[in-house]
Amino acid sequence: MNNGLQNNGRQNNGLQNHGLQNNDLELDSLIKKMADGHQPELPSPDVIWWRAQILKKQAEKQRIERPVAVMRTAAAALFFLVVVWLVTSEAGSMRDAWRLLGAFPFVPLLLAGAVIGLVVMALMWWTTSEA
């Protein structure tokens, strides 16, 4: 009984695959007929001019905004270098202050500075990516 159902299922799959192959051949011939009947047309001169104007404006915008993006990157790098320099040059006095006052008064300041720095950097990259 089970063997008969399997054979019947194989026959149905074979018929379905054969039907799919016929549909593929019909689709291919239909596409070929449509392609043979199609005559490509050039866009009108107005459309070509309009697209050229858009591309020209985009190129001008990129050319104008490139120095601003470079300066943003340079400012972020300079900020990072100054922070590293301050931390390394003032490490001894920072350790002394932490010993005298304890770490607690500086933790909120450090966290606030880190959050502000991250927000500024995110805004810099967000505005740069929109351009």
Image: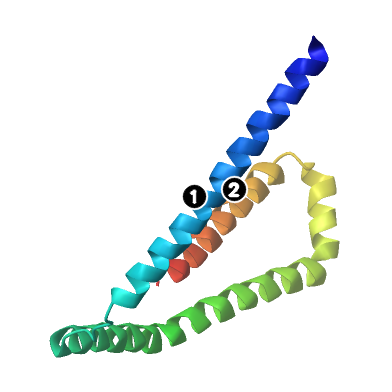
Helix, strand or loop at mark 2: helix
Q: Quadrant of residue 40?
A: bottom left
Q: Residue at x 52, y 50 (%)?
A: 22
Q: Quadrant of residue 88?
A: bottom right
Tell me how far mark 1 sits from mark 2, CA to CA.
66 Å
Q: Residue at x 47, y 62 (%)?
A: 28
Depth check, front residue: 120 or 101: 120
Q: Quadrant of residue 42?
A: bottom left
27 w.r.t. 12: above or below:
below
55 to the left or right of 131: left
Mark 1 and mark 2 in contact? Answer it, CB < 8 Å: no
23 to the left or right of 84: left
**10 Å neighbourhood of mark 1: few (<14), some, or many (≥20)?**
few
Q: Residue furthest left?
A: 46
- Type of amino acid at the residue the image marks with label 2: Ala
| Quadrant showing the N terminus | top right
Depth check, front residue: 112 or 52: 52
Of the numbered discs 1 and 2, the one sitting upstream in the chain is: 1
**In this rendering, the label closer to the viewer, 1 or 2:** 1
Q: Residue at x 57, y 50 (%)?
A: 21
45 to the left or right of 69: left
**10 Å neighbourhood of mark 2: few (<14), some, or many (≥20)?**
few
Percent position of residue 64, x then y: 36, 87
Tell me, for residue 23, which label it has, or none: 1
Helix, strand or loop at mark 1: helix
Q: Residue at x 41, y 70 (%)?
A: 32
| Quadrant showing the C terminus | bottom left
Mark 2 sits on what residue?
Answer: 112
Percent position of residue 94, x then y: 79, 58
10 to the left or right of 100: left
